[in-house]
């Protein structure tokens, strides 16, 4: 279904979402996020680790396809990224017992530690950005963003 909407607050909302996305892609953000977390040299490494972590939370190891889907990249790109992350000792890669064509990816202890360090850093950065906001404003923003993300995800799947 296509809805024709006159330019209004929706343009402003889209612009704000775009600005946040662009800010988080800038080299300064990456440097701040990954500084002194040696094994995680790139955002791609971080995203691959996060993809595997999400699958592990679901009770299973990840596949290259899972990583590709999470990162929103082609299978070949995810495969190259995973090879780099495995070589860095942050992931284990084994053959799936039920399908020798498929691999299973699991976080190593070093990968888990690196991911925890980056997660702590992200939390610190976000907390710093909203440090002078009232808790009620932060809670309201979290609730609204949760709702927005769910609605976007529903729209993408439709």
Image (cartoon, rainbow, N blue to C red):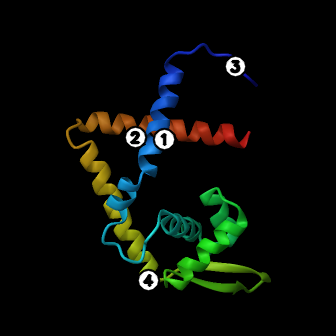
Q: Residue furthest left?
A: 132
The label shown at residue 3 is 3
Q: Which dot, 3 or 2, sits closer to the camera?
A: 3
Q: Secondary structure at mark 4?
A: helix
Q: Position of residue 5 (x, y in %)?
A: 63, 16
The numbered mark, 1 or 3, whose residue comes first in the sequence reads: 3
Contact (Cβ within 8 Å) of mark 4 with mark 1:
no
The numbered mark, 3 or 2, whose residue comes first in the sequence reads: 3
Q: Is residue 35 visible?
A: yes
User: Residue 90 vs residue 59: left or right?
Assistant: left
Q: Residue at x 41, y 77 (%)?
A: 39
Q: Residue at x 40, y 55 (%)?
A: 27
The label shown at residue 109 is 4
Q: Secondary structure at mark 3?
A: loop
Alpha-carbon span between mark 4 and mark 3: 49 Å
Alpha-carbon span between mark 2 and mark 1: 6 Å
Q: Is residue 136 above or below residue 93?
A: above
Alpha-carbon span between mark 4 and mark 1: 30 Å
Contact (Cβ within 8 Å) of mark 1 with mark 3:
no
Q: Which residue is mark 2?
A: 142
Q: Which residue is mark 1?
A: 146
Alpha-carbon span between mark 1 and mark 3: 23 Å
The numbered mark, 4 or 1, whose residue comes first in the sequence reads: 4
């Amino acid at each position: 279904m296509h809805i024709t909407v006159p330019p209004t607050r929706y343009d402003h909302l889209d612009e704000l979402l775009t600005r946040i996305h662009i800010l988080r892609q800038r080299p300064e953000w990456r440097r701040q996020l990954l500084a002194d977390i040696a094994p995680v040299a790139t955002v791609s490494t971080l995203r691959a680790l996060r993809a595997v972590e999400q699958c592990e939370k679901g009770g299973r190891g990840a596949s290259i396809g899972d990583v590709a889907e999470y990162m929103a990249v082609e299978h070949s790109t995810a495969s190259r990224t995973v090879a780099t992350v495995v070589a860095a000792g942050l992931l284990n890669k084994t053959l799936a017992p039920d399908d020798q064509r498929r691999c299973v990816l699991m976080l190593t202890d070093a990968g888990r530690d690196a991911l925890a360090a980056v997660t702590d850093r992200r939390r610190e950065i976000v907390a710093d950005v909203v440090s002078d906001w009232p808790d009620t404003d932060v809670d309201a923003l979290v609730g609204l963003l949760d709702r927005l993300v769910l609605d976007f995800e529903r729209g993408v799947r439709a």
